[in-house]
């Protein structure tokens, strides 16, 4: 995480301190990002407080980490018009309205990760860090490289990164504390049979080798590792969730020393399916692990979801199961009679759980009580593995501005 920021210093005026700015600082901290931006237009004093970098860092830390959801909206207005819009949105179960908030949208000419077709241009989400998303776009008919973008959906600023050849696989996005820069970790299989890991620096655009491994460190599924099982950045380390071939271990990459190592995982069952039942989370600075259990429900869906907390980061033996959330299986089953199954994941520090079906989202608190029932007029609804923690902090690598949420046009 970013270094702890001090409060913005009040301005000195004719021998007395403008304490009003200090009061406004505390008020602005409690406002959503959109309201903070609007407050900047009121007067110079508000602009100064709401634009100060130290304030923006504090404001970012107070934002909730929200789950990112993917789905497709269809616009069928006759035989001549048939257009699909691919949406990336977030949901805050603690908000009063429980409405989805748009993060990104793009038209039918761009295809999403959920339904890949090699003949179409695709857009994929590879990482989320400090409010910034790592996206790739490619057209396999025209090129064998993926174009990479960093995008802040809150400020709508974005920047390009050097393209990656399709032989490379992105393992994670992280913020490098020492250089104050975003970096991309990726790998490819070398001719000698070893996996070579590389780091790409957003600011300098340099790419360099950092490690050579006999086998993959973090996942047995190289094509979908970062997309399906992304790492969590905490204490300058990237952490990948355990996999079925090594359920007792969490793979770790130190972003300062650029070395790999392993830490102990809690005693959990790791599903052998491509989409794992295990997810790592940053719960207000504490490493947590969400694990869904299917013991009594077969292939239909999980019976419960456990949320584990690592109480002492320096002692990976101290994992504590803070929540064991029993899901109302009978109630959920009424909604998915026509489906093969459903899945669930913890999405908040309080133990809130999201269950997703074909075109329906169900929310439950840590006691198993229903808190949300959102029918969605869409297709291919899916809770992504990434979380978004909105940020107004500017960065030099995101210098271009897009006034709309449609980052990628059709041309």
Image (cartoon, rainbow, N blue to C red):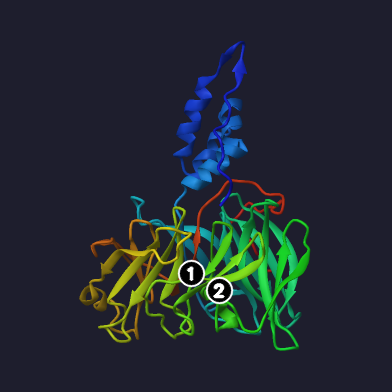
Q: Is residue 374 above or below residue 170?
A: above
Q: Residue at x 32, y 71 (%)?
A: 305
- Residue 49 in view, yes or no: yes
Extreme-left residue of the structure: 330
Residue at the image point whose x is 57% and y is 58% from the top: 129
Q: Quadrant of residue 217?
A: bottom right
Q: Mark 1: which secondary structure?
A: strand
Residue 35, relative to residue 214: is it above or below?
Answer: above
Circle 1 residues within 10 Å: few <14, some 14–19, many ≥20 = many
Which of the two residues, 238 or 257, is positioned nearer the viewer here? 257
Q: Residue at x 61, y 18 (%)?
A: 12
Q: Secondary structure at mark 2?
A: helix
Q: Position of residue 205 (x, y in %)?
A: 77, 61
Q: Which residue is mark 1?
A: 385
Between 270 and 254, the one nearer to me in the picture: 254
Of pointers 1 and 2, the one earlier in the residue sequence: 2
In the rendered image, residue 327, in percent from the top left (x then y), is placed at 26, 71
184 left or right of 91 in image: right
Residue labelled with disc 2 = 227
Percent position (x, y) of residue 346? 37, 65
Q: Quadrant of residue 220?
A: bottom right
Q: Position of residue 87 (x, y in %)?
A: 51, 66
> Along the line of sight, which residue is nearer the eye, 263 or 357?
263
Q: Is residue 401 left or right of residue 265?
A: right
Q: Quadrant of the C terminus?
A: bottom right
Check the image and name the residue furthest to the top: 14
- Whether residues under marks 1 and 2 lie with C-beta atoms below 8 angstroms apart, the answer is yes
Few, some or many residues within 10 Å of mark 2 (<14, 14–19, 20+): many
Residue 82: assigned label? none
């Amino acid at each position: 995480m970013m270094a702890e920021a001090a409060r913005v210093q009040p301005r000195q005026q004719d021998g007395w301190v403008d304490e009003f700015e200090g009061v406004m600082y505390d008020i602005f901290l409690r406002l959503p990002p959109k309201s903070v931006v609007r407050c900047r237009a009121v007067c110079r004093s508000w602009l100064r407080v709401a634009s100060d970098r130290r304030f923006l860092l504090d404001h970012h830390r107070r934002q909730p980490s929200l789950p990112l959801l993917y789905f497709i909206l269809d616009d069928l207005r006759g035989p001549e018009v048939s257009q699909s819009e691919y949406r990336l949105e977030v949901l805050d179960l603690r908000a009063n309205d429980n409405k989805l908030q748009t993060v990104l949208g793009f038209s039918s000419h761009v295809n999403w990760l959920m339904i890949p077709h090699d003949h179409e241009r695709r857009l994929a989400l590879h990482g989320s860090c400090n409010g910034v998303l790592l996206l790739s776009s490619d057209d396999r008919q025209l090129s064998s490289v993926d174009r990479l973008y960093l995008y802040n959906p809150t400020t709508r600023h974005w920047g390009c990164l050097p393209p990656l050849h399709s032989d490379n696989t992105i393992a994670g996005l992280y913020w490098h504390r020492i250089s104050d820069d975003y970096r991309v970790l990726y790998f490819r299989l070398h001719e000698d049979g070893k996996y070579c890991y590389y780091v790409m620096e957003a600011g300098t655009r340099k790419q360099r080798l950092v490690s050579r491994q006999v086998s993959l460190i973090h996942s047995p599924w190289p094509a979908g590792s970062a997309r399906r099982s992304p790492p969590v950045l905490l204490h300058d380390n990237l952490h990948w969730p355990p996999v079925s071939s090594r359920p007792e271990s969490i793979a770790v990459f130190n972003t300062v020393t650029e070395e790999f190592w392993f830490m102990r995982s809690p005693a959990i069952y790791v599903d052998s399916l491509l989409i794992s039942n295990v997810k790592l989370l940053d719960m207000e600075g504490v490493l947590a692990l969400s694990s869904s259990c299917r013991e009594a429900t077969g292939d239909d869906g999980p019976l419960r979801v456990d949320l584990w907390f690592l109480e002492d980061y320096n002692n990976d033996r101290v994992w504590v199961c803070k929540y064991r959330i029993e899901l109302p299986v009978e109630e959920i089953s009424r909604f998915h009679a026509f489906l093969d199954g459903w899945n669930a994941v913890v999405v908040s520090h309080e133990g809130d759980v999201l269950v997703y079906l074909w075109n329906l989202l169900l929310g439950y608190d840590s006691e198993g009580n229903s808190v949300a029932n959102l029918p969605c007029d869409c297709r291919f609804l899916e809770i992504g593995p990434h979380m978004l923690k909105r940020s107004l902090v500017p960065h030099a690598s995101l210098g271009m501005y897009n006034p709309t949420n449609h980052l990628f046009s059709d041309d």
